[in-house]
Amino acid sequence: MNKLGKVIVRIPATSANLGPGVNSIGIALKLYYTVIVEEPTSEWRVNHALGEQIPHDENNLIVKTILKINPDIKPHQLTVMSDIPVMHGLGSSTTATVAGIKIANALGKMNLSLDEQINLGSRMEKHSNNVASAILGDLTISTFDGNLATTVKTTIPKNIKALVSIKNSSNQSKIIADNEMISYKDAVNASSFSNVFIAAIMSNEWSKATSMMELDHFYKYISSDDGYNLNLIRNIAHRVGVHSTYLSGFGSTVVTLGTESELNQIRDALSDQDFKGSLRIINIDRDGAQVRGE
């Protein structure tokens, strides 16, 4: 079953929600999580430099995913390299899950379709937005009912990039629903914001799309650090005329979408501010997860 050459899996980072698209909308970014499947071994071994909190054995999320999908796959040595910061709202756990799905599919010669892979990942992640974007690339819109994910892939304009503002600490934001309930009016508004965002993207009306991205009635952010960074970056972006800044997933990274010229202006202005973290302009990944050696 495992008479394959060396398998190399590369999974892009993902950024979820994009404002009103909670657990539904995601984009893929050109930061990568790469796994090399090496020789069969007597026990699973995962080589990485991601920190001691990430297991090196069969308890690693990649291996657990592989065996959940196909328990007959024999142990291998895996080597992991990643540009994606752990626990910063850029899909680091999703990349490990998707890597496990891709490896199980390759080693087990399972011939899983992309839809089947997205369904498997969504069941493990309990939502579909990061999984769909990691597997398909670009911008995806999806829904997941607990068993079946339905996904549409579309395209962000080719000149749009992401300014990724990563704070030094890795604590995710504490987020609560407003009073645990929202009014009917707010629910309708939130739904309409998301609907208009997607319609504008698919009709190539970027300015209309971005006008929806900072509107969100479902959640409020209560982490003082993330709230400070989000508002700081939004205010500077607004001066440049950019209204597309949001907290990626549930933190702690803030993402702004715009042209390279716009994002450079925002980054230059932020360098004079008290932003404790890194600022990177990153391209959108258009192709999603890639596997070599199948």
Image (cartoon, helix red, strand yellow):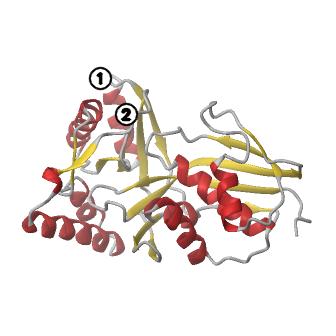
Residue underneath mark 2: 267
* Image spot of residue 51 (x, y percent): 62, 31
The amino acid marked with disc number 1 is: Gln
* Image spot of residue 285 (x, y percent): 54, 57
Placement of 186 over or under 234, stated as above or below: below
* Image spot of residue 76 (x, y percent): 83, 52
Placement of 4 over or under 223, stated as above or below: below
SS class of the residue under badge 1?
Answer: loop
Q: 12 or 176, which lies in front?
A: 176
Residue 190 visible? The answer is yes
Taking 214 as reference, is 169 left or right? right
Disc with the residue nearer the chain's start (1 vs 2): 2
- Quarter of the image holding residue 270? top left
* Image spot of residue 26 (x, y percent): 42, 60
The amino acid marked with disc number 2 is: Arg
Taking 128 as reference, is 178 left or right? left
Which of discs 1 and 2 lies nearer the camera? The answer is 1
Residue underneath mark 1: 273
Classify the position of the N terminus by image quarter: bottom right
Residue ID at (92%, 65%):
3
Count residues near mark 1 (Cα–Cα under 10 Å), then give few for <14, some for 14-19, many for 20+: few
Placement of 144 over or under 133, stated as above or below: below
Count residues near mark 2 (Cα–Cα under 10 Å), then give few for <14, some for 14-19, many for 20+: many
Residue ID at (19%, 56%):
215
